[in-house]
Image (tube, rainbow, N blue to C red):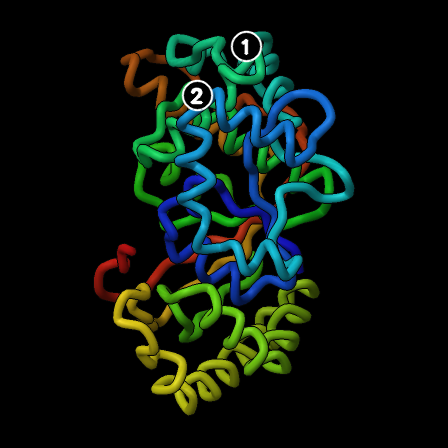
């Protein structure tokens, strides 16, 4: 079970990212990189030219043990999720199905490498997405996930576009379990090791899209977690992020590959006050992508 997590979720350490770090066998995310041959030297040089890039990388320090352990990465099969961005931008410009998005788009993602790195880094860090950045980026992640047969992770639906997207989803598996919502990375690694058997069983059920098996596996995982909760939430260093646990609801669903563009276009149509046929009813045949929506049950989402 390999998932693709949004860089917005990585930066804000939302439950969508934290739960993925425990549940998924491997995690892919999207980090802007300099054009040309990628190396430590090229990344270092880009960081010296683009201060925001440094801020973005520093905001991911919490996940460094996951990257070092090979659990998390920024590519899959030698390809980068952001390789899909230009294709998405072209489709927005050329396909009338997505025409309502055009007034909100800019050409910044089609500029030189440093400009793109700066724009994406700034938008991800501020956590108040600019649709000209976040829509193409999120759509690119879905295309990447679809092409490679991966699962695109979603957070709880809050925006009008996210809620519209849910209307396009075909639920496959729904389940819930208790897990760590906030903690230092070493505690997430500890949970992966402690509950390796239970997690593998849940991953297999999700891969098979077997809701009954997933619910049984999730219940067993919750029971095991309850026995170890006190130890997993222990305080070792007062300066560390406080460990917090909670119940999460997860829904594995199937979406059109262009669901982000369709739902965002529908939301843009309402903002622009346009009348006419919904973009939803005009969509032609497209590929599909599996999504996994992660939503905390009860209480407020912990903030690090």
- Using a 10 Å C-alpha cutoff, classify the residue at mark 1 as few (fewer than 14 neighbours), some (14 to 19) or many (20 or more): few
Question: Is residue 258 visible in this depiction of the protein?
Answer: no
In the image, taking residue 166 as reference, residue 2 lies left or right, namely: right
In the image, taking residue 57 as reference, residue 233 lies left or right, namely: left
Among the two numbered marks 2 and 1 on one chain, the one whose residue lies closer to the N terminus: 1
Q: Front-most of 232 and 158?
A: 232
The residue carrying mark 1 is 111
Q: Front-most of 283 and 205?
A: 205
| Cα–Cα gap, marks 2 and 1 | 10 Å
Q: Front-most of 106 and 235?
A: 235
Count the numbered circles shown. Answer: 2
Residue 239, position in %: x, y?
28, 65
For the point 66% across and 60% down, which residue is it? 1
For the point 46% across and 26% down, which residue is it? 120
The circle drawn on residue 119 is 2
For the point 39% across and 57% down, which residue is it? 15
The circle drawn on residue 56 is none
In the image, taking residue 147 as reference, residue 95 lies left or right, namely: left
Residue 213, position in %: x, y?
61, 76
Vertical comparison of 250 with 277: above or below: below
- Using a 10 Å C-alpha cutoff, classify the residue at mark 2 as few (fewer than 14 neighbours), some (14 to 19) or many (20 or more): many
Quadrant hosting residue 217:
bottom right
For the point 64% across and 77% down, which residue is it? 201
Task: Give the SS element for disc 1.
Answer: loop
Quadrant hosting residue 277:
top left
Quadrant hosting residue 301:
bottom left
């Amino acid at each position: 079970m390999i998932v693709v997590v949004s860089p917005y979720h990585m930066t804000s350490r939302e439950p969508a990212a934290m739960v993925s770090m425990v549940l998924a066998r491997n995690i892919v995310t999207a980090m802007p990189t300099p054009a040309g041959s990628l190396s430590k030297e090229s990344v270092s040089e880009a960081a010296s030219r683009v201060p925001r890039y440094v801020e973005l990388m520093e905001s991911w320090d919490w996940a460094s043990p996951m990257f070092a352990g090979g659990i998390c990465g920024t590519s899959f099969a030698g390809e980068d999720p952001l390789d899909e961005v230009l294709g998405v931008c072209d489709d927005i410009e050329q396909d009338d199905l997505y025409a309502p998005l055009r007034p909100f788009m800019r050409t910044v993602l089609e500029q030189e490498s440093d400009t793109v790195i700066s724009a994406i880094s700034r938008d991800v860090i501020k956590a108040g997405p600019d649709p000209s950045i976040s829509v193409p980026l999120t759509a690119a992640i879905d295309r990447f996930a679809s092409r490679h047969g991966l699962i695109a992770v979603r957070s709880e639906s809050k925006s009008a576009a996210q809620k519209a997207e849910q209307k396009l989803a075909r639920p496959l598996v729904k389940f819930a379990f208790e897990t760590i919502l906030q903690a230092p990375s070493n505690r997430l690694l500890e949970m992966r090791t402690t509950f390796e058997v239970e997690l593998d069983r849940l991953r297999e059920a999700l891969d098979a899209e077997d809701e009954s098996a997933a619910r049984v596996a999730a219940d067993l995982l919750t029971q095991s977690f309850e026995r170890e909760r006190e130890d997993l939430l222990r305080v070792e260093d007062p300066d560390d992020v406080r460990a917090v646990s909670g119940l999460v609801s997860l829904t594995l669903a199937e979406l059109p590959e262009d669901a982000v563009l369709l739902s965002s276009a529908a939301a843009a149509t309402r903002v622009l006050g346009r009348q006419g046929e919904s973009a939803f009813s005009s969509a032609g045949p497209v590929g599909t992508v599996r999504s996994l929506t992660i939503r905390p049950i009860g209480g407020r989402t912990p903030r690090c």
